[in-house]
Image: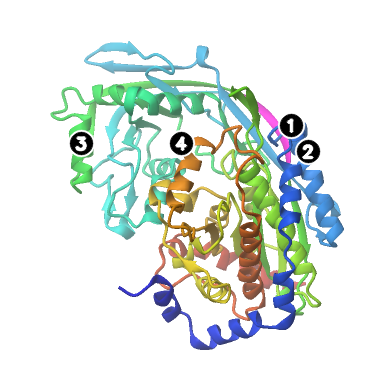
Amino acid sequence: MLPIIFLISLLVPFSSRAQYQKQLKAKEVKQVVNNVNPEAIKAHMTFLSDDLLAGRRPGKPGFGIAASYMATQFASLGLQPGGDKNTYLQAVPLRSGVVTEAQSAFKVTRNGQEQILTFATDFVLQPNMGLPQSQVSAPVVFVGYGVSAPELNYDDYANQDVRGKIVMFISGAPAKFPNNEKAYFSSAATKNSIAAQKGAVGVITVIAAGENNATWNAYAKRVRAGSTWWAGPNGTPNTYLPALKGLAAVAQGVGDSFFTGSGTNLLQAAAALRDGKPASRTLPVTVSLTTTTKYSNIPSYNVVGILPGSDPVLKNEYVVYAAHLDHLGLSAPVNGDSINNGAHDNASGSAFLIETARAFKSLSKAPKRSVIFLSCTGEELGLQGSDYFASNPTVPNGSLVANLAIDMPFFFYPLRDIIPHGIQHSSLRGPVEATAQYLDLKITPDPAPEEVVFTRSDHYSFIKKGIPALFIKGGIITGDPNKDGAKIIAEWRKTIYHKPQDDMNQPFDFNAAAMHVKTNFLIGYLTANDTKRPTWNKGDFFGGKFGSQNATAHDESKNEDKAE
């Protein structure tokens, strides 16, 4: 089998590869790359992850301090304000909802007998972000994974009329799907949207119990903490689905009980799904859901700086770097520490964003396209800040051409390879491959597809708007036969990720951090200078699913310019 980097290079025209290498070898670009300062990265991280900021949770004073720090850094570099009213801040109207459990209920009726389930033990409810109280009662239809993907020749809804019904499905998506497509169809947002399109009035997700019911308990704890979205002008999120009057999840045993009398059980249905066999069926139960939601508004901000491009035409197009600024705030103490400092997640990405901007500003001439540096709020709340910006850009609609997200990049050993999530979907593979060759970095396929990283960071907000995007992570090659990079990363996720231990007392390699900045800078530099606008690959799933949105916005923007 040919190495992946060689296979990629075959897809990039020779003329483009030659032009990329010519730009990379320019004396000034070399000097800029060599001047990336590891100590500056460390300094930014140290401040942003200090206990003073109390974990940078949106709506809390610590996040405000962090946002002021980013805005001040952007100003000191001479970036133009890209926020509201000629400031660096873009207000993001976050709205939080928590279910009032005492005024909510889940009732099951079978053969005329009603059973009332117990909140948290048997079920949980998602907040209804459109109504303070909503009610629905309907028969239940099991729809497998809850996936309808005709483009992948798969449909759990085939031969099922779910209009006016509550649909129940298990988590995940068919194993035969490509990894990124599987991540897309596994998401609750996608499944809920499909259910609404099919005419359902509610959804129930069955959550696997796991060892000692641990999976269910962890899931229930997260849901009970509430949900947060950015709110549109009417106070509801743009993802609100008014057709769905109830959003519930049940423990595995409860879900299985709904199958009693149907001729099969949940485990058999799940096994059939894994074997690629249909498993959807009407279940002999009716469910009534009552959801009462208490709302609160959370004032927060994105921080936006802009480097104007140098080309009179292409400067009206923008390459966007995005790194989330927020983290989890305070939590129950772990070894006496309750502050989730978020040094790696994502003070590191915020530091990289500043130093990438510094690299661009140190050029004697800006690249052809303009470059946006976006410090996002609410990533930990579901990619809210980046989704808000992608949906409400502070530059003309259709002018965003590419995104590079920087989040928890991994630099615990020298950077010898990168994992560029999204490389297989668009022409951005060209700048990635050229940069990797120039910096002598290998390109490694995703070693942990089960983590579904492709949908879990800010780049995905741009992909959903049809904008080609990349998410570059550090690889697994350590250069030391006694150190297994994949194991180091897996252990970090297990013991430190989203815990107070993610502070500056970690064995960071800041030279590797500087190499990350160089990599992201060069990929964006080549993209910003390319006379061709980045495109989705022909026949690409995500390009087909979302690409028309950005193309339409781009055409409308051009027509507006002509009208003016």
Q: Residues within 10 Å of mark 1 (few under 14, many from 20)?
A: some
The tag earlier along the polypeptide, 1 or 4, is 1
The tag earlier along the polypeptide, 3 or 1, is 1
Q: Residues within 10 Å of mark 4 (few under 14, many from 20)?
A: some
Q: Say which mark, if any, is on residue 491.
A: none
Looking at numbered disc 3 in the image, what kind of residue is underneath it? Ala
Q: Residue at (40%, 51%) from the top-left corner?
A: 448
Main SS, magenta region, reads strand
Q: Residues within 10 Å of mark 3 (few under 14, many from 20)?
A: many
Q: Are marks 1 and 2 in contact (CB under 8 Å)?
A: yes
Q: Residue at (62%, 73%) from the top-left corner?
A: 527
Q: Which residue in the protein does label 4 denote?
A: 243
Q: Are marks 3 and 1 in contact (CB under 8 Å)?
A: no
Q: Which residues are magenta?
A: 294-300
Q: Are marks 1 and 4 in contact (CB under 8 Å)?
A: no
Q: What whole-number distance in Å separates the C-alpha atoms at marks 3 and 4? A: 27 Å
Nearest the viewer among 336 and 406 is 336
Side of 3 relative to 374 (left or right): left
Q: Which residue in the protein does label 1 denote?
A: 60
Q: Which residue in the protein does label 3 denote?
A: 269
Q: Are marks 3 and 4 in contact (CB under 8 Å)?
A: no
Nearest the viewer among 131 and 477 is 477
Q: At numbered mark 4, what does the secondary structure look like: helix, strand or loop? A: loop
